[in-house]
Amino acid sequence: MSTAERLIESARELLWERGYTGTSPKAIQQRAGAGQGSMYHHFAGKPDLALAAIRRTAEEMRAKAEEQFSASGTALDRVTAYLRRERDVLKGCPVGRLTQDPDVMGDPALRAPVDETLAWLRERLAEVLAEGRERGELDDALDPRAAAATVVAVLQGGYVLARAAGSVQPFDQAITGVLGLLTAHVSTICASRRASGTGAEPLPPLS
Amino acid sequence: MSTAERLIESARELLWERGYTGTSPKAIQQRAGAGQGSMYHHFAGKPDLALAAIRRTAEEMRAKAEEQFSASGTALDRVTAYLRRERDVLKGCPVGRLTQDPDVMGDPALRAPVDETLAWLRERLAEVLAEGRERGELDDALDPRAAAATVVAVLQGGYVLARAAGSVQPFDQAITGVLGLLTAHVSTICASRRASGTGAEPLPPLS
DNA sequence: GTCTATAAACTGATAGAC
DNA sequence: GTCTATCAGTTTATAGAC
């Protein structure tokens, strides 16, 4: 791996672990095994290197999410696959955590990938949910945009709860909770079943 | 206000705006209008002052939440009041944001109030939801602990989305979304109504 | 109690040798 | 390209005058 690559990867790790303010150029250089001059040869400075790191992290995050979003199965299957995907829960979200960094949010260039990534996640999830509604998998009462924002928020907030507790338990509970709430919107067939006391039964396969 | 008080209040503001790592003793002193010696006379150092500030913020947060939790009305009324309460959305949660600060999470004393506050929020919300279920307001299918974790996560994640977007819109959408999902669990009466196409009507008053 | 002075380490960057 | 040297400013204190 080239020196520039090692610097970017080291910056990605440190930004995830310690944030922008908590990450010094020196720390990045040491982790990358590079000297001062080497870093300033490849990058204009800390913000420039951070931008490269943040862009790569954002890109990677979208690619991983798209794997679940574009998979086969019902809308709820895909949302469940996304939420239940293996994650480094206690490390938190490498993109979401940057929203707490005033120096990142104060720099339009650094902020843009953060903004775009979370906006893309909401849009893409809204599309998946809207598709599920059109197919008759999901209740018409469900607002795809609002539900999408809720799903992304549960994920971001789940990380916060897990880190505070030092345990994945509250994260898992939050995910379980929102999936349970979404299940109640799985077509009106489900609602009528629940009303007649047979809610525990699975739905029939899709046509 | 005494010098010690001014230092604590200044620390609270700066911890909210810039986090622990991003807040220097010098910045706290300047905002408080106090000298170096003054701060070190009243507090052992940055961690000690931060602890006083974090404890106060945590206490205030619990007190505000308890206002809504212990209010009158149905469980859903109280959860709605809590979620819809006026908030400084773009500033984020002064307690939740500390979970992103490795120096806070690495110090057991600083971490404790953060952990305890978010755990208390989940427990208290679970109690409110369990009470609503016992009263027959909420569906038996709803898991109070999971739903409570979801509600707190939506709040914490909503802040993240709002800060990323630079707008309260995704926060409001996430809240609207989770309240919409919860509404589907408002007693089985609601489910049968939705199944029969009269879901827009309000529920009858409680006995 | 509050102030100024001092200090060792770190931060973010530049200069110039190799 | 990579290195070491240097630097002005900041961070987190401590010391001691008032």
Image: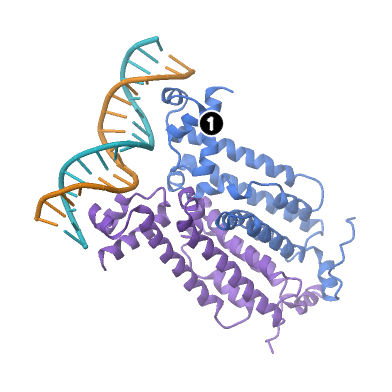
Chain colours: A blue, B purple, C cyan, D orange
Residue drawn where x is 76% and y is 66% of the image: A184
Is B28 on the left-hand or right-hand side of A33? left
User: Label 1 lies in what chain?
Assistant: A
Q: Which x, y percent locates residue D9?
A: 27, 38
| Three-letter amino acid code of the residue under disc 1 | Ile
Image quarter of residue A154: bottom right
Q: Which residue position holds label 1?
A: A8
Horizontal and vertical percent for residue A107? 44, 42
Numbered label tally: 1
Q: In this rendering, is residue A29 above or below B45?
A: above
Pinpoint residue A34: horizontal percent, then vertical percent. Answer: 48, 25
**Image quadrant where one finds the N terminus of chain A:** top right
Name the outermost residue toward the bottom: B207
Q: Position of residue B79 (x, y in %)?
A: 60, 73
Q: Is residue A171 visible?
A: yes
At a point 82% along the width and 72% down the height, the residue shown is A194
In this view of the protein, which residue sits in the foreground, A194 or B34? B34
Tell me: A199 left or right of A56: right
Quarter of the image containing the C terminus of chain A?
A: bottom right
The residue positioned 45% from the left and 57% from the top of the image is B110
Query: In this view of the protein, which residue sits in the foreground, A22 or B205?
Result: A22
Q: Is label 1 in a helix, a strand or a loop? A: helix
Q: Is residue B35 visible?
A: no
Tell which of A104 and B23 is nearer to you: B23
Q: Residues within 10 Å of mark 1 (few under 14, many from 20)?
A: many
Drawn side of residue A146 relative to residue B41, left or right: right
Q: Nearer the viewer, residue C16 or B52?
A: B52
